Image (spheres, rainbow, N blue to C red):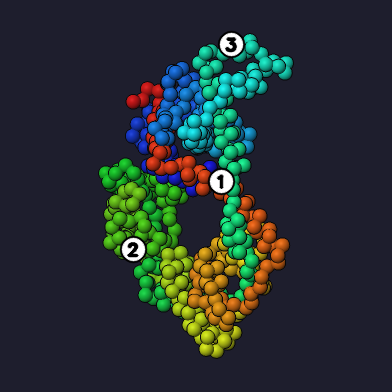
Amino acid sequence: MPSRDVRRLKAKQPSSVSEVLEKKKTTHPLLYVGSIILLILVVITFVGSPIAQRIGTTGSIVFGTYDGKDIAYRPGNYFSMQVMNAEALMKSSGQTQDTESLAYSVWYRAYQQTVIQTAIMAAVNASGAMVSTDKIDENIVKLPQYMENGTFSEELWNSESPADQTSTRQLVSDGILRTAYEIDLFTGLMTASAEKQFVASMGKTERSFQFVSFAFSDYPADEVKKYAAANAEKFRKIKVSRIQVKGGESEAKELKKKIEDKSSTFEDLANTYSTDSYATSGGDMGWRYYYDLESDFENKELLKDVFALKAGELSEVIQGTYGWMFFRCTSEAVDADVSDSATLDVVKDYIQRYEKGKVEDYFTEIAGKLSRRAGEIGFAAAAREAGTQVATTGYFPINLQSVFPYDTVKAIPESATPSSAVYNEDFFHRGFSLGKNQASPPIVLDDRIVVLQLLGERQAPEETAKSLENFSESLAYQSLNGPDITGELMNPEKFKDDFFNTFITYIYRAPDSE
């Protein structure tokens, strides 16, 4: 299933399996242990006794509905077979996920396949298609589980219970219908001549450009210094250690009291009780910038109190974003030294990560001026005036996301190629809208700004245009295998997903839990 449809299936999930188990662990330790024991059993035999005992031989677990029909797990049905197939696939691929992730992955993969199967069968049933008894029999006698010495064994077939025989016949019938559905879908595909011509026209015209590029990484040091001076508080730094707990304010205050009355050391308590990643180093966080710690504080004013600590002092107990915490100052806070190159590197990195819009605005203004000046003094002269160099591209058609298997955006020299251009619709729109000697407005390409000027235009060779007409059929087939057909099948008005909650309830639930 395409990734966007997987994301749609997951959209309603309230939290991860890990978070649910962590909650069980902290609120009901015995229940958590029971869950893990069951989980191990499930991983060892996904369709074995733990599930079978819970639902019985005729019961089922419903994970969702499609068009009012249950998407259910029952011993011997399509879903259960997909569970076994997914388990076998993961084992054969040598995947080494932890137990929790493996179980979830196996069941979710099986669920995805079952949802698609249910949707296809709903479409087939709506058409009134049926499979004859003779056709089902023809396929059953070829099933390997009923073969003995290379021939169908009636004894093996008759050894099956009536319920299992009915289930097998249904699976065979569904398989025949699905195959017929897919054959009809693909062999019945028609591509209109106008559509072929339209696709071909996208590749018939090829253009080359000269361009300038302003990389965000070239944001000047003077601008970095200005930002540092205007936001000096963000780049003050202090050396601290921290203890953070999830047990509440009282636990944090009790730990702080033990340090104050010297009945235990900060380091020992951090190692034993702290829940953050610094616990193993005795709570030592090293030097931290003010902006580093801001996200940990719900009340940002309390961070100022931490930065006012003297060496050796403990802060008050603070309710943070991830629990209750308190700090010990190792070295007092110092102001940012904007003359220090290492400090400026930190500031520049901060700007690139958190203030990228400021960098974009800066280069957009410069690029806009260059574009306007190009109309007055020429592109090359405007580039020299702006202190940048001109590069050129080879000829290429409108080929967004490299849909066509040739002629994509390449600069001369190739190292100057803006790598994200091929994925940017605005790049192609602006470039292929330019008239002679006209410079484009600034175009944003992820981590840079470019300005284009048309160099030349030509028509692709006739054989290229012809191959593009044929390529349109390939695109149509790709859409059937991809998100278009899946998106149609996965109509949100028909599909009701409850996989996550059902999985947690039935697969991760301890045998004696409610």
At x 39%, y 46%, the residue is 274
Secondary structure state at the residue bearing disc 3: loop
Q: Nearer the viewer, residue 507 or 259?
A: 507
Residue 188, labelled with which disc?
Answer: none
Residue 386 screen position, x and y as percent? 53, 83
Residue at mark 2: 307
Q: Label 1 amino acid?
A: Leu
At x 43%, y 69%, the residue is 357
Q: For this view, does 501 lie left or right of residue 81?
A: left
Residue at mark 3: 159
Is the residue 101 above or below the residue 176 in the image? below
Q: CA distance from mark 3 to mark 2?
A: 78 Å
Q: For this view, does 224 lie left or right of residue 295?
A: right
Residue 18 screen position, x and y as percent? 43, 39
Q: For this view, does 319 lie left or right of residue 50?
A: left
Q: Label 2 amino acid?
A: Phe
Please say if the residues under marks 1 and 2 sit with CB atoms less than 8 Å apart: no
Residue at mark 1: 480
